[in-house]
Amino acid sequence: MRDGRRGYRWAVAVLAAGALVAGSVTGCSSKNQVPSIGYAVDAVPVSYNGGSTLGANGGAAAVFSRVLTGFFYTGPDGQPVADTDFGTAKEVPGEAQTIQYRLNPDGVYSDGVPTSCDDLVLEWAARSGRFKQFDAASTSGYADIERVECQPGSKDATVVFRPDRHYVAWRTLFNAGDLMPAHIAAQAAGIPNVVSAVQSGDRAVLDRLAQFWNTGWNLKPGNIDTKVLPASGPYRVESFSDSDGLVLVKNEKWWGEAARTPRIVVWTKSGDLAKKISDKAVGVIDVGAGSVKNLNLSGFTVNQVPGRGAEQLVLSTAGLFAGADTRRAFATCVPRQALFDKLGHPGFDVKVGPGAGPLNSRTVQQDSPYYPAITGPADKYRTGDAAAARQALGATQNPTVRIGYRAPDDRRAQTVALIADACKPAGINVVDAGAADFTATQLSEGKVDAVLGGTAAAPGPSGSLPGVEAAAALHGGQGSNFGRYGNGRYDAIADQLAADDNSTTTLNLDSEAENLLWSEMPTIPLFATPRTIAFGAGLENGIANPTEGGAGWNMDRWVLQR
């Protein structure tokens, strides 16, 4: 499919014209291409499955978008970009909203099994909410689908939404990093194919499918089975260890344009990043700004940019914070303006849009035309008022608030320290519960009272322009809702916003949502998460992507000349 092969290259070229780009587009005859590029990112690759709660929170999209491709991927501005190498998706007329998907006829996994609509059926079943045994990060959009019409093994699928639903952000469905190999799940469950199993609704079979979908793709350094990790993109997983990193190598079965560098080594931030940089083992860096202490990036082209993710405190709705009054009292002493001034815009100073001040909404981007009109309720919680916080606590005197985050992270450690200093006069004891093995699930387990992280409590790259994951993280019953917040009216608002793009309706609903959320205080938004994205000398085609997609969104185009 020649047009399909041209699609991804064309998209990258167009996006590069308006994005933050490192290096030139032509090589230098006096230099040689380096066969391996190190990519340091603060994602936590604990699962291959980006649709699961574990995988989504760990930032699978920032690591595996060019390993597991899909109909769209997240571009540098946070927008869904069509990947016609994988296939095509188009809305077609019908009584109900209908999307016609066609996978590339040449598409095949690295293990030789063709891509098929079975993969879409598995993703829908796991994320539809109909089968509760699946631990999906979010059911947004998938829950609105009535059926996926698919003949097992076919390259065609028709997705039909419920008659009473219309999903505006349908381009966020069945995407890179999320669409998993259904044949692997079928083998694990001991069934011929996923499609028949889902259609039959056999509980025992679905239980086996869910067990594998939830945990069968988990990744543990030094103990992975690459047989269950076939790739549908230009790279595949070769190995994973603490000493050698997550090694991605060129996928020889990839039907599109071959990856330009044979090997990418993904390093997480928990490694000795400073030493790897000095040893020239890293060519691309994508981490939270200020998160790595004494980071020396001399010789790199450095982009300090506001991200699409929301730096925030996600609060528990149990234990100490079971009541909204206590959550509001804590928010009253959090110095959001001071936090932004000191930590929220390192290396950049923008006047409008993301990064232009404290973040005053949980679900609406700072460059949205609705943002100025809906953020009034945030003003009360801008500066931090210890006396008012003490009074608001009422009978709950001298509480201890444990704030967890993935460590080491110098900026987040400073954030917790500043909050502790500001809230101490209110009688609130703030404890830094950051740890190298911290996960957001510790919030729902009651081990901490708050998580400091990005959108949906992510430790690394997060956020997108549609903001689906931000809305889902506050919706009842979602895996990414780690605080277990539940409010029926908010759920109804979020569902209506997902289905209706009328500007007046959107403005009214966004306003109602913000008033409700600042009253209920399930989270405390601080600022747009600042990102440091850097490309080493001689690195060509590096394009900053301060979203959930990360700098690795186009890693198959990277070339390093030395």
Image: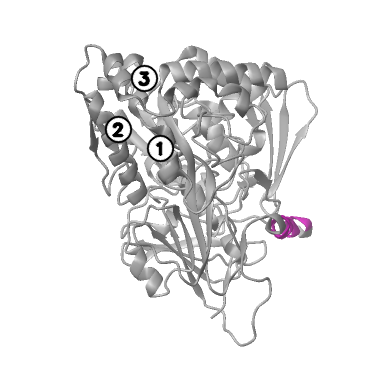
| Horizontal and vertical percent position of residue 43 | 42, 51
Quickly name the residue at label 1: 338
Q: Is residue 49 above or below residue 511?
A: below
| Horizontal and vertical percent position of residue 424 | 23, 30
Kindly tell me whether residue 509 is visible in this rendering: yes
Quickly name the residue at label 2: 422
| Residue closest to the eye, 238 or 279 | 279
Mark number for residue 124?
none
Residue found 36% across the figure and 38% down from its top: 452
- Toward which corner of the image does residue 481 lie, by quadrant? top left
Q: Amino acid at mark 3?
A: Arg
Residue found 54% across the figure and 37% down from its top: 123
Q: Amino acid at mark 2?
A: Ala
**Left or right of residue 201, residue 293 in this image:** left
Quickly name the residue at label 3: 328
| Horizontal and vertical percent position of residue 531 | 48, 51
| Residue closest to the eye, 265 or 281 | 281
Residue found 64% across the figure and 43% down from its top: 79
| Residue closest to the eye, 77 or 219 | 77
Badge 2 marks a residue whose secondary structure is helix
